[in-house]
Image (cartoon, rainbow, N blue to C red):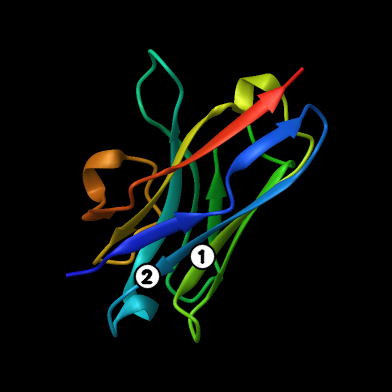
Amino acid sequence: QVQLVESGGGLVQAGGSLRLSCAASGRTFSNYGMAWFRQAPGKEREFVAAISPNGASTSYADSVKGRFTISRDNAKSTVHLQMSSLGTEDTAVYYCAANRVGWTSSLTRTYDYWGQGTQVTVSP
């Protein structure tokens, strides 16, 4: 079993930056594919970014490409999402997710573990 705990959310003005973190429990973090998803009010959960177990491969949703960067520190069992040039459309609850097989998938059904989420609100 893996537990994921997100942190770093908050209120930021448009154009600003935030760095989200996800701390994972368990001894096999370095085997997991990790990802960030988000869900805005009234909308379905959507893919944001994913990273392979060794960090060599990443993927991003088109809406965040060039603005967001996903990274991981396997020694600390953490994954980060650096967000810049934030807009009001980025307002959502952001979730960290892990899959046991190491995929960098954009599909929610391929992830085995989820955090509770952290709220990101971008004001105009």
Q: Earlier in the sequence, mark 1 or mark 2?
A: 2
Residue 38 in the image, given as x and y percentages of width and height: 45, 35
Mark 2 and mark 1 in contact (Cβ < 8 Å)?
A: yes
Q: Horizontally, is 82 left or right of 58 in the view?
A: right
Which residue occupies 42% across, 72% down? 53
Q: Is residue 43 above or below residue 76?
A: above
SS label for mark 1? strand
Q: Which residue is mark 2?
A: 24
Residue 82 in the image, given as x and y percentages of width and height: 67, 53
Judging depth in this view, the residue of 14 and 106 nearest the camera is 14
Say which quarter of the image contains residue 103: bottom left
Judging depth in this view, the residue of 46 and 41 nearest the camera is 41
Q: Is residue 102 above or below residue 64?
A: below
Q: Horizontally, is 85 left or right of 91 in the view?
A: right
Q: Amino acid at mark 1?
A: Val
Q: Amino acid at mark 2?
A: Ala
| Marking on residue 79 | 1
Residue with the most extreme right position: 15
Which residue occupies 77% across, 17% down? 124
Residue 8 in the image, given as x and y percentages of width and height: 59, 52
